[in-house]
Image: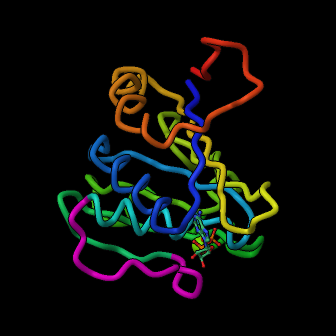
Amino acid sequence: MVIEMETETADRTREVGRVLAKLLQPRDTVVLTGDLGAGKTTLVQGIGRGLGVKDHVASPTFTLVREYTGRLDVAHVDVYRLERIQDVVDLALEEVGGPERVLLIEWGDAVQDLLPEDRLRVRLTTDRADGETRRIVISAQGQSWVARWERLEGALEPFRAIHPDAPAGGAAR
Ligand code: ADP
Ligand code: MG
């Protein structure tokens, strides 16, 4: 289960987040990976918008965790450096933001052993020379995403990356 996309602007990345947010359910975990400046926080801003969060969504770089309320409660965590890993361990993630909250965790791979099996992974990369285009690859593990996958694929269809050299009909699944 993989969906590959490309966005040409930060707003377009927010739009991906907004669409993705429609599929989110209580207690979901979304792990965001990608280098500094790849667009993880930008995408989280879109998810916040999609969940009807009214507050401005800013990077939790200095606070470790920021909490928001919209259609769902949201906890946004950023594990951006090694010393943060212990902070996140101490945080008892399952207790942050209430039992129903959605967890959006930047650099979440660094603490994956602390995360539920069932999760969505979003990887952002900047492999285009233009400095703007981002490649976004979404993958999932867990039963709850199997059930939602077709809907997610359908919703994200407008952002699909076009692969000129991919075999015909060989779109990534
Ligand atoms: P991260 O959280 O991964 O460190 P941010 O989201 O804070 O990254 O920063 C991404 C930066 O890149 C922002 O300044 C944003 O405006 C810019 N940007 C330019 N093009 C894009 C794009 N296509 N998608 C996301 N961000 C983009
Ligand atoms: Mg960030």
Does the magenta run of residues contain 156?
no
First to last magenta residue range: 51-64
Q: Is residue 130 left or right of residue 136?
A: right
Q: Quadrant of the C terminus?
A: top right
Specify the quadrant that holds the N terminus: top right
Residue 142 spot, x, y in % from top left: 48, 27
Front residue (pair 123, 113): 123
Question: Residue 86's image quarter?
Answer: bottom right
Residue at 53% across, 60% down: 105
Q: How many marks?
A: 0
Quarter of the image where ligand 2 sits? bottom right
State the residue lying farthest toward the front.
164
Instruction: Based on the picture, tell me whether residue 63 belongs to the magenta stretch.
Output: yes
* Left or right: where 171 falls relative to 29: right
Q: Residue at x 47, y 75 (%)?
A: 65
Q: In the rendered image, which quarter is residue 126 located in? A: bottom right
Taking the view exactly as shown, the residue that stands out farthest to the left is 71
Colouring used for the render: rainbow
Residue at (56, 51) in percent of width and height: 31
Q: Position of residue 39 (x, y in %)?
A: 60, 66
- Quadrant of the image occupied by residue 24: top left
Task: Name the residue nearer the viewer: 159 or 136.
Answer: 159
Residue 148 sits above or below residue 26 on the image: above
Residue at x 22% of width, y 77% of height: 54
Position of 88 relative to 173 (above/below): below
Main SS, magenta residues: loop
Residue 75 image offset from top left, x and y in percent: 39, 66
Q: Position of residue 122 (x, y in %)?
A: 57, 47
- Closer to us: 119 or 23: 23
127 displayed left or right of 158 = right
